[in-house]
Image (spheres, rainbow, N blue to C red):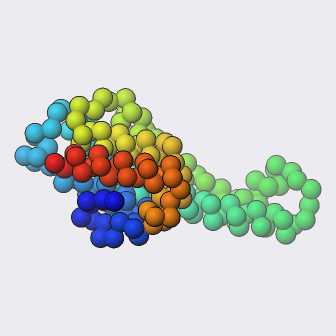
Amino acid sequence: MTDNPNITNPSSVNRRQAIAGAGAAALALTGPALASVPKSDAELIRLGAEFDRLQAEWLPALSEWNHFYGVAHEAWKAKNIPFSEEEFFAVQDETGATAASDREDAALSSLEDIAEKIRELPAEGFAGLAVKLRVLRYDNFSNEDFDMPEKDMDWGPRAFYQFAAEIERMARA
């Protein structure tokens, strides 16, 4: 379960709530509260807020690309012709899949740049560790693993979710 005040019903949390809650927790450490955390954790918290913002921008771009790729695939099948890479790329261009892919690639590149900076910095306290844990989640689980009530998650994502909630709780203490 979670103590996150931005998630009113932990059993019905979805990825948007989790991202919003994580970002709000990071942003809550500003001013005097931020001054009391170790210097590297303060930088991790700043980068974590940027990571959350960029991830929130990337997820819709990923969803859009998935949609348009499906449209392109269906359009390709409807042509009922032998596979040709050149022809398939033309279908992707016609259906908007290429443009959606370009937008997703740009968003992912920005997200990866911030994630790499977070991976490189050491955490000195629980607040910094909580940021690194969000990147670890991004690195190791698909979004679908967490886009459901906690009680319906597979064991691995659920155990990770519960551990992350405990770290976040300790970071707020």
List x then y, in percent, for residue 26: 25, 50
| Percent position of residue 113, x then y | 43, 38
Left/right of residue 142 with respect to residue 161 in the rendered view: right
Q: Is residue 37 above or below residue 101?
A: above
Q: Nearer the viewer, residue 151 or 167?
A: 151
Residue drawn at the location 51% of the way across and 52% of the way down = 155
Residue 75 sits in quarter: bottom right
Towards the viewer: 152 or 8? 152
Estimate the x, y position of residue 16 in percent, counting from the top left.
Answer: 40, 63
Asked whether residue 136 appears in the rendered view, the answer is yes
Number of dots carrying numbers: 0
Residue at far left of view: 32
Of residues 20 and 114, which is closer to you in this image?
Answer: 20
Q: Looking at the picture, does residue 79 appear above or below residue 52?
A: below
Q: Residue at x 32, y 43 (%)?
A: 131
Residue drawn at point x = 37 percent, y = 29 percent? 120
Task: Tell me if 97 is positioned left or right of 89 in this view.
Answer: left
The N terminus: image quadrant? bottom left
Quarter where residue 69 is shown: bottom right
Is residue 59 in sight in this rendering?
no
Q: Position of residue 103 (x, y in %)?
A: 54, 54
Question: Looking at the image, which residue is at 41% across and 70% down?
Answer: 12
